[in-house]
Image (cartoon, rainbow, N blue to C red):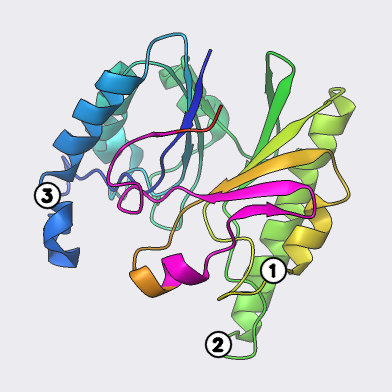
Amino acid sequence: MKRFAIGDLHLSQSMKKPMNVFGDHWKDHAHKIKENWERQVTDDDVVLIPGDISWAMRLEEAKIDLDWLNKLPGKKICVRGNHDYWWDRPKKLMDAYPQMVFLQNTAYTLDNLTFCGARGWICPNPISFTSEDERLFTRELARLKLSLDVAMKQGAIEIWVMLHYPPTYGGEKNSPLTELLKAYPVTRVIYGHLHDSLSWELALQGNYEGIHYQLVSADYLDFRPLLLL
């Protein structure tokens, strides 16, 4: 079993929102993702998807995108992104798509590896961080802790964490979120959300204090699922 990751699929089959308005490299991006996915991933593999799956506003609108994703090879494990307004109760989602995992306030273990996750939010910073940002960040930090605590109750030995938002802000290596992660047996963190060269350059990546951080936004990966292990 191989483990891949790719985030920010930004599918829009019901919304008809062309992503090439964000750059020519987004033209026909869903087709690129599908081709690369089917070339690399088998049904025995796992693909981690850290949010921004569909532009749809409601679940019934997202169905065409989720059906498309469900038909691709491999088991998909997902967390919510800031644009996933269609996201409903995890039980309802998993009843509709039993081969997919929708992580929210829980953990999922497969072959001695436990997956945790949360959407996250903008990390505290001196440039742009409002009282509303603080409220949302604190809430998401609590949700991640809940997921990690569930993992420990399940007897987790090794944990991989999925976030939509980056774990730190603009070139920083530490945040309240990274401090939380160090209190658990977390070995890898994947995240997305970033879509420009400057933020890519500043993103926390590689091994830091025993945890491997990896940006997996679809455009950063040139729309190819990244083999993690």
Q: Residue 182 appears at what percent x and percent y?
A: 84, 52
| Vertical side of 30 occupied by 85: above or below | below
> Answer yes or no: do the residues labelled 2 and 3 have beta carbons within 8 Å?
no
Q: Which residue is mark 1?
A: 173
Is 81 left, or right, of 20 in this rendering? right
What residue is rendered at 40% in x and 51% in y? 217
Q: CA distance from mark 2 to mark 3?
A: 32 Å
What residue is rendered at 53% in x and 12% in y? 1
Is 127 left, or right, of 10 in this rendering? right
Among numbered discs 3 and 1, the one appearing first in the sequence: 3
- Please check the rendered image and state whether residue 222 is part of the magenta-colored stretch, yes or no: yes
Q: Which residue is mark 2?
A: 128
Q: Residue 55 appears at what percent x and percent y?
A: 28, 50
| Vertical side of 37 occupied by 224: above or below | below
Q: CA distance from mark 2 to mark 1?
A: 18 Å
Q: Which residue is mark 3?
A: 16
Q: Which residue is more in the foreground, 109 or 98?
A: 109
